[in-house]
Image (cartoon, coloured by chain):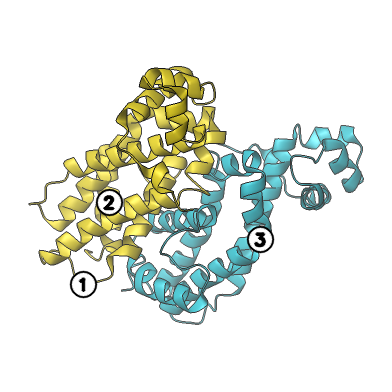
Chain colours: A cyan, B yellow
């Protein structure tokens, strides 16, 4: 799915802030366009000119939250550390971020009709965000001679898909609740995928 | 989520056959318990004794289909081939199987309220099926000296999650439509994950 420019226009923090606060208070289902307009201090006509329908706002809010989440993970990585340490700490920061993000976990169960399609059949743009971020990190590590030469995108996409899968289905043998176990998992297995083992 | 024994009782092919044929003809939403009973040649009372609700039947049908899918992939792997060839051909068989399975792809979009929770927030049993199968293959290859020693389950689960992710979101840079490209992707990247590169 291609997001239109309008949907991707994130320079409208007042609308996205208003929508997010309404989603948190009322839930997505019970939030009307009128409520978003009120919280954004815009007329409904102006809101509709920017977002034709609620699903466009939901998607834009979700994309912004995904970007924020990636920024939070990135802030926990020390670019001066060894490649292995950056990979391991990045994975740990991701799992801790998911654990903290109780809202997302709750919305997957309470409002699946909005959240599940966005993160599955329509998740291309979310995977692309994660892939682009991880491919950038890979390229940086390769340029610094800390990682061998290989095409970054496919490996970055495997990692982005693993991350999204752990958000959607925490249930399994990959540790997401215990920091030390997550660290050991990343050290043992993610390193192999990125050719560090 | 733990499946109760009753839900996992797959020795009732007549019910699962009847339900599957009704799902294919009418869709899941419009299939009633009465229709399943009729097609299974059982009284509604008997059907309800075995499956308390439609969602239990849906889950049992889906688990059986997942097992069939794994068996189909497994049948395409030559256990006498090199480990790399088995990994690559297994991945190719998986992607071709997904492409052929238009029904599943269609149901994700037309009946998301039934299919998406099953394959996301409730997908633990499906991931476990894939993980157990792949861990078994790994153990066999390790016992034959074709793969080095490492704990099979975590790596098997990464692969199972990647597979499920490609079913839910084909959109991305990992090739699922082109056999030769899928083969090259598996040779370049899946081999690293299973410590063959």
**Contact, CB < 8 Å: mark 3 with mark 1?**
no
Q: Residues within 10 Å of mark 3 (few under 14, many from 20)?
A: few
Classify residue B40 by image quadrant: top left
Give the left or right position of residue A90, taking residue B91 as reference. Answer: right
Judge whether residue B180 can be spotted in this image.
no
Q: Nearer the viewer, residue A94 or A52?
A: A94
Question: In which quadrant is the C terminus of chain A drawn?
Answer: bottom left
In primary-sequence order, the first of circles 1 and 2 is 1
Question: Real-space Cα distance between discs 1 and 2?
Answer: 21 Å
Label 3 resides on the chain identified as A
Judge whether residue A75 can be spotted in this image.
yes
Where does residue A77 sit, x and y in percent of width and height? 55, 75
Q: Secondary structure at mark 2?
A: helix
Q: Which residue is mark 2?
A: B186
Q: Secondary structure at mark 3?
A: helix
Q: Which residue is mark 1?
A: B149
Q: Residue lying furthest left in this view?
A: B80
Q: Nearer the viewer, residue B34 or A99?
A: B34
Residue at horizontal 20%, vertical 44%? B74
Q: Which residue is mark 3?
A: A102
Where does residue A164 sit, x and y in percent of width and height? 51, 54
Q: Which mark is residue A42?
A: none
- Do dots 3 and 2 share one subunit? no
Q: Residue lying furthest bottom in this view?
A: A81
């Amino acid at each position: 799915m291609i997001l239109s420019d309008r949907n991707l226009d994130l320079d409208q923090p007042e609308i996205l802030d208003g929508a997010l606060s309404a989603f948190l208070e009322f839930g997505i289902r019970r939030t009307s366009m009128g409520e978003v307009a009120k919280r954004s201090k815009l007329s409904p006509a102006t809101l509709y000119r920017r977002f034709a329908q609620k699903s466009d706002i939901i998607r834009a809010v979700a994309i912004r939250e995904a970007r924020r989440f990636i920024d939070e993970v990135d802030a926990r990585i020390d670019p001066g550390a060894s490649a292995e340490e950056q990979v391991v700490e990045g994975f740990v920061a991701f799992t801790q971020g998911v654990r903290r993000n109780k809202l997302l976990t709750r919305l997957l169960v309470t409002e699946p009709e909005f959240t599940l399609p966005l993160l599955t059949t329509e998740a291309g743009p979310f995977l692309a965000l994660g892939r682009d971020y991880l491919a950038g990190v890979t390229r940086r590590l390769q340029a610094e001679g800390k990682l061998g030469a290989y095409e970054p995108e496919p490996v970055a996409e495997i990692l982005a898909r693993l991350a999204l899968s752990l958000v959607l289905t925490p249930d399994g043998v990959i540790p997401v609740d215990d920091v030390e176990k997550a660290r050991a998992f990343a050290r043992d297995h993610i390193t192999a995928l990125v050719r560090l083992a």
